[in-house]
Amino acid sequence: MRFFDLLSLISSNLSRRKGRVVLTAIGVVIGTAAVIILVSLANGLQKSATSQLWGISDLKMIQVSPNYGGGEGGPGIVGGKGGGGGGSNQQLLTPQTLKELAALPGVEAVIPRDYLYSYAQMRFGKLETYPQLVGIEAANLDVFEYPLQGGSTELQRGTAVVGSWVARSFYDPSLRPGQDPPPPPDLLGQTVRLEIVKWSNDGQEIRKKISLRIVGVLQETRGEADGMVFVSMGELTQWNEWVNNKRINRSKDGYTNVVVKATDPNNVIELANQINEMGFQAYTPQSYVQNINSFFIVLQIVFGGVGAIALLVAAIGIANTMTMAILERTREIGLMKAIGASNRDVLSIFLGEAAGIGFLGGLGGVLIGWVTAQLLNIVAANYLAAQAAQSGGPPTTIALSTPVWLMLFGLIFATLIGLLSGLYPALRAATLMPVTALKYE
């Protein structure tokens, strides 16, 4: 039997029992729609979580810290490698170490960072705050890919780039109870006064006054950069030398922290493992993303399994419908065999009808599931946007995500369920003896 003749015959047989076919297919529709909606929910939650993490910190960045010999670093600590410093198994981030890190495959940049070894007070007019000062050994912050709100990310002597929260952290120390706090100042292009504090041997407080011009303000990312004041490494090193009353030798003392930027975020985990094997302490938020993805994959499987239970019930309905069809069409089967139809032809017809019911139900389930997911997305987006407005955080952009592969999988899976459900009735129909089938009443 030719393929198109087979399709025509299957379509004709299904159209003769529209009511029964529709009722049977409804079970497949419900099961397929449940799979689409539940897996879309898990997929949407995964995308929302990972997208928020990407905004919190660039997933191409690896934070590398020295190992001071406490045994808590990565494996393979080699004595003395990376610089001296007083411990046989210390791993310091010296200039030679930076060259070794930069030579690793997949490394785009190696940027040393350091922090102020004391605390500082920043003043602007009557306002003041206590910022976190970070020195960057790079001429420009664009290597970190921080989004810029205004100004420039270039770091020069006497200049600074501030995060979005720094302006909001200013307060008026002379403000009386009941008075409204002043609005956050516009720091871009302004000069602020910085006072670094240290103590003498007899406990006297000593302050070093510095003027800084704010040349750039970063956009809010809800990450560590939001509360930082970035300055050049050379300037911060001088301040730390003043605080400690001694010069800093990077070949001997090393750096407090180094940021390794990978060329591809997919290689970050492997690169972090290599750095740990060198004896340093490497941390990357990509590890959290990996754990989150693993969790949501399991969640998708569980949700898909819950929806598949409805498809299993629908499969029983398809098997029952096809079994009843064989009983009703026994003489028809005998007549087909009497005029030359083979067992294979009969098997193909009934398998095709069962698969057709699964296909129609799967098609309806995919459409209903997709439409329902979009409607729930709109409702959830409005609700989450209202919640975000009250809490002051960024709104979640997506609640349910229905990828194309999920819709194709739902359609193919429903068709296979129909095909497998009709296998036993079809085999039973194909093995009927023509004489017995023609005598069936």
Image: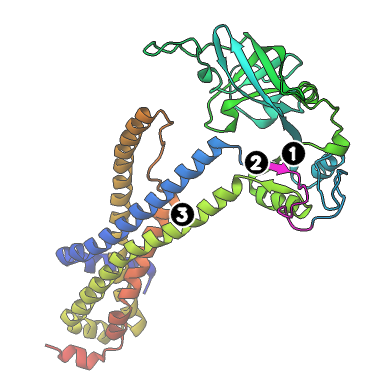
Which mark sits nearer the N-terminus, 3 or 2? 2
Q: Up-down: is 207 above or below 30? A: above
Q: Mark 2 = which residue?
A: 60
Furthest toward the top, the residue is: 125
Residue at 75% from the left image edge and 17% from the top image edge = 156
**Mark 2 → mark 1, Cα distance in angstroms:** 10 Å
| Residue 32 sits in quarter | bottom left
Q: Mark 3 = which residue?
A: 296
Q: Mark 1 = which residue?
A: 108
Q: Is most of the magenta stretch helix, strand or loop?
A: loop
**Contact, CB < 8 Å: mark 3 with mark 2?**
no
Span shown in magenta: 63-76
Q: Amino acid at mark 3?
A: Phe
Snapshot colouring: rainbow
Q: Quadrant of the N terminus?
A: bottom left
Q: Amino acid at mark 2?
A: Lys
Q: Nearer the viewer, residue 405 or 265?
A: 265
- Give the SS element for disc 1: strand
**Contact, CB < 8 Å: mark 2 with mark 1?**
yes
Q: Amino acid at mark 1?
A: Glu
Which mark sits nearer the N-terminus, 3 or 1? 1
